[in-house]
């Protein structure tokens, strides 16, 4: 499987490469597990949930109820892809709790109650298929059949993943405590595992696990703040030593919901068979891939909608691939320009024909008669260099001009002689093409923000003025009003009549929810 830059970029051209989800955020699985473990070890999350278990027991002491009351700390989620079915595990500590027995006929009594040593026991649930995980961003709250780890109340959005526990045959439960520690009989591994399995089988359908709390900034005018709405996990195994975990994200209000049926196998097929590259470039540990159509619909179109008269999706074929947008821009108006040499009184006029006045009338022109605006986001310099945005646009229009040439002649008629003014009017036209060819290095992007302002200045457009055939005055006009008549020089009046380009801005707002620290960690 090729991992070179060109193959990777070409592999991403397919519209379905993200399984039609808006965004695919991919991490090195080993590194994200290490990060999650490190974050989990940090104190102070405040994520505690209480569970109560009552198990009917019959042993040498007779028949009775064994009761457990546990305060469970925040679960550590870890991901595995050692087999063809990717899984995850939850590991949670019993922060505190108590155990007691009660009579069958009087279950509310408490006999032989013991307080548990705090932070001594760990419960691990393994082999949870990733395909069973269903994530959303609407915290509903738990019920009698759901173990809920509540989010931090100070935040206004939550990422909650429901981890179903519906197939007890596949559910692997284990209990750990320090070697050499002698727990009460009911807390020994075999007894507690039996109680937990029965509890999960009969009374629990799911863990509602808050992966993150979101407090998105209020969008400012013209920006787009994306709010995550739904999630799925998939994995991609490159080798026994390297696997990638991907979080598929759908945003609120998305017009195209992502694929959910057989999404794990579809994800592997897309990259193995179609793209022929892994979802992360070689020598990198993570990637963020934005769906082409979603990028166009949610980023580019809203930014341009107020400036264009129409927008049409176009397909880009060939090796480049991808999708594009053809915009129609409103007609533009260039203001009238007037120039005067100011020769003053006739006695100061030249004796040879010189230009005295030049007028460039106002003109309305259509900026759609040249090359369309093209925006190309690229990593062609390599993934170790900043990404670039290449902007190319060209438009042209025809201008007319009219002017006056003057000179003075000496007249001897009826007297000693005097200077007489002479003037002649001239007119013509020229065609000017303006080209913007600019590359912006996206060095200002952080791991979480994507804000790009594209605003072409007048001096960034290259003008090319060509007079109409047979116009013999061009050189003279250039000399008079442009300072030079050299071939290829641009008269100043051509610069002055250039529109500074149609200004356009893309302010994509913040993508703060894409951050590793905000998604894959316990609520904090």
Image (cartoon, helix red, strand yellow):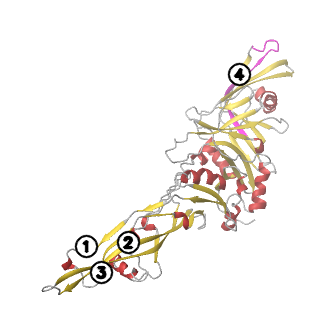
Q: Is residue 449 left or right of residue 183?
A: left
In the image shown, does 92 or 152 lie closer to the viewer?
Answer: 152
In the rendered image, the quadrant that contains the C terminus is top right
Q: Nearer the viewer, mark 2 or mark 3?
A: 3
Q: Nearer the viewer, mark 4 or mark 2?
A: 2
Q: Is residue 193 above or below residue 253?
A: above
Give the distance between the C-alpha atoms of the residues marked 4 and 1, in whole angstroms.
106 Å
Percent from the top left, x then y, of residue 43? 58, 37
Q: Earlier in the sequence, mark 1 or mark 2?
A: 1
Majority secondary structure of magenta residues: strand
Which residue is labeled 1 in the image?
342
In the image shown, does 310 or 69 lie closer to the viewer?
Answer: 310
Q: Earlier in the sequence, mark 4 or mark 2?
A: 4
Percent from the top left, x then y, of residue 275? 74, 61
Determine the secondary structure under disc 2: helix
- Residue 114: mark in rendering: 4
Do the CB atoms of the residues marked 1 and 2 lie less than 8 Å apart?
no
């Amino acid at each position: 499987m090729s991992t070179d830059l060109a193959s990777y970029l070409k592999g991403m051209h397919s519209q379905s490469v993200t399984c039609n989800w808006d965004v695919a955020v991919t991490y090195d699985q080993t590194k994200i597990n290490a990060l999650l473990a490190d974050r989990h070890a940090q104190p102070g999350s405040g994520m505690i949930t209480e569970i109560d278990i009552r198990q009917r027991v019959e042993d040498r002491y007779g028949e009775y109820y064994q009761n457990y009351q546990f305060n469970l700390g925040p679960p550590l989620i870890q991901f595995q892809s050692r087999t063809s079915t990717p899984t995850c595990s939850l590991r949670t500590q019993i922060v505190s709790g108590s155990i007691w027995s009660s009579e069958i006929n009087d279950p509310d009594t408490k006999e032989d109650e013991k307080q548990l040593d705090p932070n001594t026991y760990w419960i691990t649930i393994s082999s949870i298929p990733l395909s069973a995980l269903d994530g959303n961003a609407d915290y509903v709250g738990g019920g009698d059949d759901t173990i809920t780890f509540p989010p931090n109340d100070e935040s206004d959005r939550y990422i909650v993943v429901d981890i179903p526990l519906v197939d007890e045959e596949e559910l692997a439960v284990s209990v750990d405590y320090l070697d050499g520690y002698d727990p009460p009989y009911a807390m020994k591994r075999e007894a507690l595992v039996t109680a937990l399995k029965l509890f999960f089988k009969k009374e629990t359908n799911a863990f509602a696990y808050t992966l993150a709390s979101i407090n998105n900034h209020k969008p400012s005018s013209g920006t787009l703040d994306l709010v995550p709405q739904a999630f799925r996990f998939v994995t991609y195994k490159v080798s026994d030593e390297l696997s990638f975990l991907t979080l598929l994200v759908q945003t609120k209000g998305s017009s195209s919901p992502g694929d959910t049926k057989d999404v794990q196998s579809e994800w592997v097929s897309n990259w193995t068979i179609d793209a022929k590259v892994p979802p992360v470039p070689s020598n990198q540990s993570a990637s963020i891939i934005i769906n082409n159509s979603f990028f166009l619909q949610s980023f580019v179109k809203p930014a341009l909608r107020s400036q264009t008269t129409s927008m049409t999706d176009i397909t880009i074929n060939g090796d480049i691939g991808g999708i594009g947008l053809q915009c129609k821009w409103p007609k533009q108006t260039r203001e009238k320009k007037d120039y005067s040499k100011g020769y003053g009184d006739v006695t100061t006029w030249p004796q040879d024909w010189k230009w005295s006045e030049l007028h460039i009338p106002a003109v309305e022109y259509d900026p759609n008669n040249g090359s369309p605006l093209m925006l190309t986001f690229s990593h062609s310099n390599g993934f170790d260099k900043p990404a670039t945005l290449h902007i190319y646009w060209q438009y042209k229009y025809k201008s007319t001009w009219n002017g006056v040439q003057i000179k003075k002649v000496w007249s001897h008629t009826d007297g000693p002689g005097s200077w007489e003014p002479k003037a002649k009017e001239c007119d013509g036209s020229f065609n000017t093409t303006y080209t913007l060819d600019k590359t912006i290095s996206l060095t200002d992007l952080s791991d979480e923000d994507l804000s790009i302002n594209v605003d072409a200045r007048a001096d960034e457009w290259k003008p090319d003025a060509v007079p109409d055939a047979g116009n013999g005055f061009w050189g003279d006009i250039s000399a008079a009003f442009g300072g030079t008549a050299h071939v290829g020089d641009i008269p100043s009046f051509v610069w002055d009549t250039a529109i500074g380009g149609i200004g356009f801005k893309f302010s994509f707002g913040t993508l703060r929810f894409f951050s590793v620290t905000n998604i894959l960690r316990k609520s904090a």
